[in-house]
Image (cartoon, coloured by chain):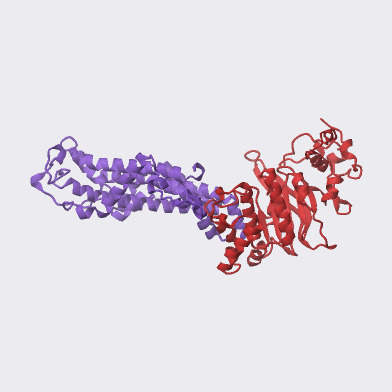
Chain colours: A red, B purple
Amino acid sequence: MNKAANNEPEILMQVRDVVRRFIGPRTSFFGPRKIAHAINGVSFDLYAGETLGLVGESGCGKSTTGQLILNLMEPTSGSVTYLGQEITKVNKTEWRRLRSEMQLVFQNPLGALNPRLTIGAQIREPLDIHEIGDPGDRDKKVLDMLEAVSLPAHLLERYPHQLSGGQQQRVVIARALIISPKLVVCDESVSALDVSVQAQVVNLLVDLQKKLGLTYLFITHDLSVVRHISTRIAVMYLGRIVELADSDTLLENPRHPYTKALISAVPVPDPRARASRATITGEPPNPFNPPSGCSFHARCPHADSKCNTDLPEFRTIGENHSVSCHHAERLSQSAPDATSRSN
Amino acid sequence: MSSQHADPDTSGKVAPARRLSLIKRWGLAGEWLVIAAMVYIVFVLFVALFGFTFQPYPHTQTDLFNQLQPPVFMGGTWEHILGTDDLGRDVLSRLIKGVQLSVLIGVIGTAIGAVLGSFLGIVAAHFRGWVEEILMMLVDVQVSLPFIIFALAVLAFVGNSLTILIIVVGIDGWERYARLARSMVLSANQRDYVLAVRSLGLGHFKIYSRHVLPNIMGTLIVQATINLPGVILLESTLSFLGLGVQPPLTSLGQILGVGRDYLILAPWIAVAPGMVIFFLTLSIAIVGDWLRDRLDPTLK
């Protein structure tokens, strides 16, 4: 809904071939350690002012991607570049400045707030840490920020557990935005909230983006939320981005069978639409023991022998539309109907 | 702190001028056992601090003509309210002096253990790796070693003075704080609010002092109240065995140890300090239990 107006958008962040391995327990006493690739070669750009929605099911590496971008975790290989600077290689003082430009908004707002500090103290804390403005200024800024997230000023002296979930999430957003970041990573930021509150918070995020020129990486498992906020959407499956496109393109013309399945899983308020759902069967594969070839082939209704052996390349198939599927061209617009049920 | 939690509406203009009594504000209404325990603890502390002002005799003053006098209520005189011991020393005076020293050792000893143990626990959780391995191995050694044997060995080899005694009883229980602090810091470090301030670039020291410690302090304080009676009992045990406080100083345990020889003939010598210890440890345990419920935010 929020198309970037300029023709040549500035690239805020560049993620290239990022791999993040986790080492698991030994299979036996002398056996080798198992290795899981939580992120297995992820590349994408984040343009200034856009909202990139990152969707996928639990355990596909969405949150890990968010943490890698914020340098809360180091990639095993690959690079994350913020405005031309590789964030894992900048020195400490420089990183201190850079990290104030990127903020994280958490999934569980109550857990993200210190139960023993007042709301006011917590919103103010980033200013204190980065020593922005003189102390009197900071109090005023906190009040302004509180107003920006539409919270009443008398909440300043309250403690987190005295607030509702929506109010808590507004406080978390206020704390993230008070030092005027450029990039905000929202990690399942509305998933823990009631649907009505979700809409309020999503609208708040959109308003703030317009007002402050923010860039969002919006991580969620919920496509119905992401379609309201995203400029572009990336779909992740088992540590890889399988499809990336402008959100309208992706939602109307998905090419990857996994994306199709995700989209058709979103409830549609039309009882007759049920028949055309593309469903997938089975569980997501164990990342310690990934399947050969295309990691989706075991659950894919279109898989053939090539999918079993060859890893599909992440290739561009249209304007701003990339997908990693051997059969992307074959799976055209009408595909959801053609998808056979394999169970 | 507790008052802020109890009435969050102080900022509102509507709040009526309600004067809650201290008892209500601390959630003590109806908790008579806790109130009694608190009163007793305050009384003992008062005696420990100011007992010297109303101590009838010096605790070392002997009166050989009045040996083994019974207390007033067992047919004694008002001259020696709680009777005298085998050397004619006034039991009440010795009790006051003993309480003073036992409380001193108990409080300082507990503080040493709490600070040392918590610090090592935080260090283990912060550095992980080999630092944690070594510290946790020390904890396991300490757990598997009967502390009384350890204390006896130290006192027998190093010799005895009040300072050494306080340090030895202070070491008792450090491993409990260390384990507790380590596990709580490990989990606190995974909390989103710690992650949030860390990603903001807050230094380690500030993270611990402002975000981690305040959230684990309650549990550590409760652990200290659980440990305090143990420390007082340990001091009493060591003194009873003759390795604790040495004459002419005296402590509750030492009086008890001496009184043991006259248990049949003059039971008041041992019973008086025994009762003081019993009720003191019981009271601290009751208050500690209440404090645990009170400091647990999930129980509010």
| Total numbered labels | 0
Looking at the image, which residue is at 19% across and 47% down? B92
Q: B160 or B260, which is in the foreground? A: B260
Instruction: Give the image quarter of residue A277.
Output: top right
Instruction: Give the image quarter of residue B32.
Output: top left
Horizontal relation, residue A47 to residue B42: left or right: right
Looking at the image, which residue is at 79% across and 50% down? A233
Horizontal relation, residue B168 to residue B13: left or right: left
Horizontal relation, residue B264 to residue B179: left or right: left
The image shows residue B238 at horizontal and vertical percentages of 29, 45
Whether residue B152 is visible here, answered yes or no, is no
The image shows residue B273 at horizontal and vertical percentages of 24, 43
Residue that sits furthest to the bottom in the current view: A134
Instruction: Give the image quarter of residue B80.
Output: top left
Q: A118 or B202, which is in the foreground? A: A118
Residue that sits furthest to the top in the current view: A343
Whether residue A267 is visible here, answered yes or no, is yes
The image shows residue B9 at horizontal and vertical percentages of 51, 51
The image shows residue B268 at horizontal and vertical percentages of 19, 39
Looking at the image, which residue is at 28% across and 48% down? B43
Q: Is residue A212 above or below residue A200?
A: below
